[in-house]
């Protein structure tokens, strides 16, 4: 990364600071990518810890914007980033250089636009049961199958956790690649012998919080 590119990016953002504040959510982070790397990163509440000078990953929002030369909206999960996010990218040109401006938001941002589900229909043995969302304590992905849990038991469901993350209400929080938890069912949060966070539900179920979701969990639960 050259200092010229870094200065160009910072100058560009400074020119549009007031405009950006009008339409970008307060929890958003911002990045500018050009010349094959990220030349600028501003951390908002949803910090994915990008580093200036970091190369643009294949399949990322920035890469797609630069390839397609148009606006791109994409959920980036842990196959591409340690910190999942919902990205909105825009093609830009700064002093003759082609680049991408990326608005980085929590991965649940999209659900606000498409609406949350009020129930899930799960399969138990050979029957299907519609279950109200507030009866569900947590969801799990295991061996390429998805399950949700209630006080009455375990139900299988066809959707993936990635799909459900976009549709579940704000009370549901992704804490691990394999788990989504209903925050209203949390009894306490503590650390295990390895200093990793563990969520204990009111029914006694213990669920680990993976390192890549710690920042999101802390932000959502306010600790």
Image: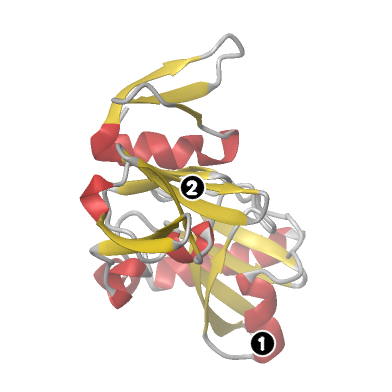
Q: Tag 1, which secondary structure?
A: loop
Q: Which of 67/154 is in front?
A: 154
Determine which quarter of the picture holds residue 138: top left
Q: Is residue 118 above or below residue 83?
A: below
Tell me where residue 14 appears, x and y as whole percent: 43, 66
| 192 left or right of 187 in image | right
Tell me where residue 58 appears, x and y as whole percent: 76, 69
Residue lying furthest front in this view?
126
Q: Is residue 160 above or below residue 70?
A: above
Quarter placement of the C terminus: top left
Q: Which residue is mark 2?
A: 47
Quarter placement of the N terminus: bottom right
The image's mark for residue 96 is: 1
Which residue appears at 29% of the width and 66% of the height? 21
* Residue 52 visible somewhere in the drawing: yes
How crowded is the residue under tag 1: few (<14 C-alpha within 10 Å), some, or many (20+)?
few
Q: Tag 2, which secondary structure?
A: loop
């Amino acid at each position: 990364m050259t200092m010229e590119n870094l200065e160009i990016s910072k100058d560009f953002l400074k020119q549009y600071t007031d405009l950006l504040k009008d339409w970008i959510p307060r929890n958003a982070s911002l990045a500018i990518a050009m010349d094959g790397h990220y030349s600028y990163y501003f951390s908002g509440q949803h910090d994915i810890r990008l580093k200036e000078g970091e190369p643009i990953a294949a399949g990322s929002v920035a890469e797609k914007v630069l390839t397609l030369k148009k606006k791109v909206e994409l959920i980036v999960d842990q196959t591409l980033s340690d910190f999942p996010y919902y990205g909105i990218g825009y093609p830009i040109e700064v002093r003759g250089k082609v680049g991408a401006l990326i608005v980085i938001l929590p991965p649940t941002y999209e659900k606000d636009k498409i609406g949350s589900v009020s129930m899930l229909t799960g399969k138990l043995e050979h029957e299907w049961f519609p279950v109200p969302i507030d009866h569900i304590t947590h969801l799990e992905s295991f061996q390429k199958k998805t399950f949700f849990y209630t006080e009455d038991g375990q139900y299988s469901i066809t959707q993936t956790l990635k799909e459900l993350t976009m549709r579940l209400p704000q009370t549901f929080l992704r804490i691990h690649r394999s788990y989504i938890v209903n925050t209203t069912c949390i009894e306490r949060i503590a650390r295990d012998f390895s200093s990793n966070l563990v969520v204990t539900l009111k029914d006694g179920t213990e669920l680990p919080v993976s390192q890549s979701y710690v920042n999101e969990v802390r932000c959502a639960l306010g600790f």
